[in-house]
Amino acid sequence: MGRRILRRLWFNKNPDHDTLLLVMVLIVLLIGIGAIVFYHTEDLSRFDSLYFAMMSISTIGYGDIVPTAKLSKVVIMIYSLIGVPLFIYTAGLFVELRLKKVVTGIVSEQKEQLDEIGEELEEIGEDLEKVEKRLKKKNKPEKNDKKSFITKLLN
């Protein structure tokens, strides 16, 4: 499934998808850099460093791992100032792309329905023209009818 998503993002010519791919790469790089920094500045395993970097950037922060060294505290402040907005931007971009897809689907469905209604209205208009022509032929006054009508009015 991950390959399919990456393939869609990589080969899609949509500028929004290009932005999403770029931001996702930046997040992965930022998490990786954070994990390396926390591994070297704190007494953490590789997994715990990665876990701490991910929990910090995603604003979950369970509190089970906390920075203790001054350097780590400074790094986590800068890391959070960069990473949290980037993470939130990425989540918003995912939502925006999904909503565009949903809205596009809804709009295309409504367009199809409006096209069908337009075709039905055209058919109704043609039928009304036929009825109007029949009525004109049927109710066409003759010259004698006008004279007889006037004489009836005068009498």
Image (cartoon, rainbow, N blue to C red):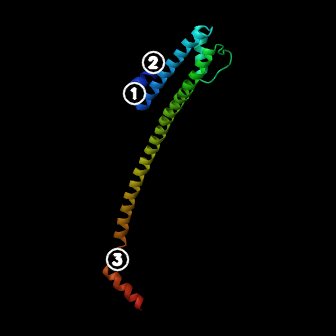
Q: Quadrant of residue 111?
A: top left
Spot occupied by residue 59 in the image (x, y as percentages of width and height): 62, 24
Q: Residues within 10 Å of mark 2 (few under 14, many from 20)?
A: few
Q: Which residue is more in the foreground, 7 or 90?
A: 90
Q: Which residue is more in the foreground, 47 or 108?
A: 47
Spot occupied by residue 137 in the image (x, y as percentages of width and height): 34, 69
Question: Tag 3: residue type?
Answer: Pro
Q: Residues within 10 Å of mark 3 (few under 14, many from 20)?
A: few
Q: Residues within 10 Å of mark 1 (few under 14, many from 20)?
A: few
How far is disc 2 from disc 3 in space, using C-alphas? 79 Å
How far is disc 1 from disc 3 in space, using C-alphas? 69 Å
Q: Quadrant of residue 76?
A: top right
- Residue named by callout 1: 12
State if disc 3 and disc 1 touch (CB < 8 Å). Answer: no
State if disc 2 and disc 1 touch (CB < 8 Å). Answer: no
Label ID, residue 141: 3
- Residue named by callout 2: 3
Quarter of the image for the C terminus: give it: bottom left
**Element class at badge 2:** helix
Give the answer, above or below, for where 16 lies relative to 139: above
* In front: label 2 or label 3: 2
**Element class at badge 3:** loop
Question: Tag 2: residue type?
Answer: Arg
Q: Which residue is more in the foreground, 97 or 20?
A: 20
Q: Quadrant of residue 14?
A: top left
Question: Tag 1: residue type?
Answer: Asn
